[in-house]
Amino acid sequence: MPFIEKLALPSHDEQHLDLIAAMPRLRSLDLRAAHASAALPSLDVPDLRELGLPTMTRDELRAIATAFGPQLELLDVRGNPDADAIGDELRTLVAGDVWLGPRTRRHTPMLATYLPAEPMWDLGVVELTERG
């Protein structure tokens, strides 16, 4: 388990925090389908670069952005009206991009490796066809 770099959790509790803490190489964490935890900012995840969060209060969002912001390339808080209300503040706390606004189907459900020059989620859907 120490080699896992991407993780999406459908639920979230204190046991999952221990699981996350045991993954030192974790780079992408998707908690958008989970419940918020006040203990999340206390985690030591030095390689974390992408974080997707569920609906949280402004204070919880500030605490997480303060804890992880300097190392994040992407903070996905789409679908959270409280995040939209403090969007400018989140942008100052996070080193990379902050995704605000409604959730859309345009973006993949699981965060992908973030490439600032060419984000793979902007490439769209590729369909392969046979040539005759």
Image (tube, grey):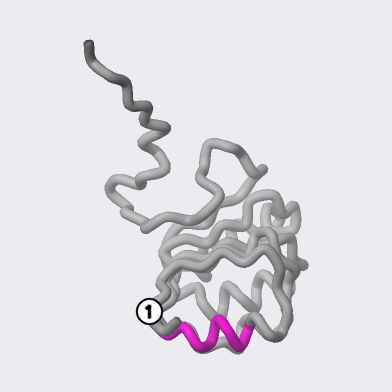
- Please name the predominant secondary structure of the magenta segment in the image: helix
Horizontal relation, residue 25 to residue 63: left or right: left
Relative side of 14 to 18, left or right: right
Q: Is residue 18 magenta?
A: yes
- Name the residue rendered at 46%, 83% in the picture: 23
List x then y, in percent, for residue 4.
42, 74
Rate crowding at label 1 as few (under 14), some (14 to 19) or many (20 or more) other CA atoms within 10 Å: few
- Which residue type carries mark 1? Phe
Q: Nearer the viewer, residue 98 or 107?
A: 107
Residue 41 location in percent, x, y?
61, 83
Q: Quadrant of residue 82?
A: bottom right
In the picture provided, is 48 more to the left or to the right than 131?
right
Q: Secondary structure at mark 1?
A: loop
Residue 89 visible in image: no
Residue at point 71%, 68% (across, down)? 11
Q: How many marks?
A: 1
Image quadrant where one finds the C terminus:
top left
Looking at the figure, which quarter contains the N terminus? bottom left
Residue at (61, 88) in percent of width and height: 18
Residue 20 seen in render = yes
Placement of 86 over or under 120, stated as above or below = below
Give the farthest residue toward the front: 132
Circle 1 sits on which residue? 3
Residue lying farthest left? 132
Q: Position of residue 73 (x, y in %)?
A: 41, 64
> Residue 26's quadrant in the figure?
bottom left
In the rendered view, tell whether residue 19 sits above or below residue 10. Answer: below
Q: Tell whether position 68 is magenta.
A: no
Q: Nearer the viewer, residue 38 or 17?
A: 17
- Magenta range is 17-24
Quadrant position of residue 85: bottom right
Q: What residue is rendered at 72% in x and 54% in y?
A: 80
